[in-house]
Amino acid sequence: MLNAMTVDLEDWFCVQNLRSAVKKEDWGRYELRLEDNTGRILDLFGRHKVKATFFVLGWIVERLPELVREIERRGHEIATHGYSHTMLTEIKPEEFEADLERAIAVTEPLIRQKITGFRAPTFSLTQRTLWAADILVRHGILYDSSVFPAHFHPDYGMPDAPFSIYQLTPSLIEVPLSCVKILGMTVPCGGGGYFRLYPYRLTRMFLRRLNRQGRPAVFYFHPWELDPEQPRVKLPRTKKLRHYLNLNKTAARLERLLDDFRFTTLRNLLGLEEASAGR
């Protein structure tokens, strides 16, 4: 079965989990490590003949435009992650619309394809922020991949959402992040910190269960998760664990994942190739 491979293209200091130590207004002071890390990912995908969806952050696009061009040259989908990595729960609708417009405006002139996909920073599309759907549609977005159908995370979750791909509105497809039910409990299994936390064999078991149920897995990760040498900042113990756990194991685990499963872009999985064709 074809599954979806997605990458949130942001650097190590953009992460919401680091916000107590890294202020957004100071981003320009920090070392950009994204180019080298993304190059490793593109080579990894190339070896395994995998095409992926890259949700690119507008702030990053302005600083590394050639990287975005190279991602597209290698045959991958470019979608948007917004401009400033501000959670929907921390922004007003008019501010979000301006942020989205800016992200699209700095990205689309660099590429041949039309941006039709969106992922909210920190998966912050929740019951409280469903107002964002109309704004996304107004700006040509055909699908969103921001909903985590879980309830235990402090920053995100929509526990009553379907586990499978569904229509969030008549004009917007929702591609939720992968979860499975184990003994009545919702267990995330689609990547990120969960991929680093679980033993690889557990991730493989969960994804195989999804595929047996006829559901494609929606997998995600960030380039900084392959970078154990990234700068360290002082964090509370829980946040430190979430960010730095098993960074030295991610690359090898991804190699195994790409051997064990087949992946494609979200655009291809949803049959939206024509809608995103060259402008």
Image: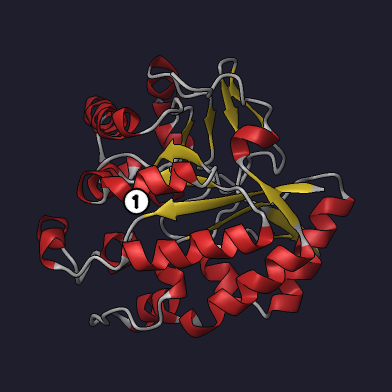
Q: Which residue is painted at 16% across and 68% down in the image?
A: 30
Q: Could you tell me the amino acid type at mark 1?
A: Leu
Q: Which residue is painted at 35% across and 83% down in the image?
A: 229
**Image quarter of residue 183:** bottom right
Q: Could you say which is closer to the camera, residue 164 or residue 116?
A: 116
Residue 176 place in picture, x, y as percent: 61, 43
Q: Which residue is painted at 45% across and 71% down in the image?
A: 225
Residue 43 place in picture, x, y as percent: 53, 63
Q: Could you say which is closer to the camera, residue 99 or residue 271?
A: 271
Residue marked by disc 1: 67
Q: Which residue is painted at 12% across and 59% down in the image?
A: 28
Residue 105 place in picture, x, y as percent: 26, 28
Residue 40 place in picture, x, y as percent: 47, 67
Decide: is 138 above or below 147.
above
**Image quarter of residue 45:** bottom right
What is the quadrant of the C terminus in the image?
top left
Q: Could you say which is closer to the camera, residue 91 or residue 75?
A: 75
Would residue 126 appear left or right of 5 to someone viewing this image? Answer: left
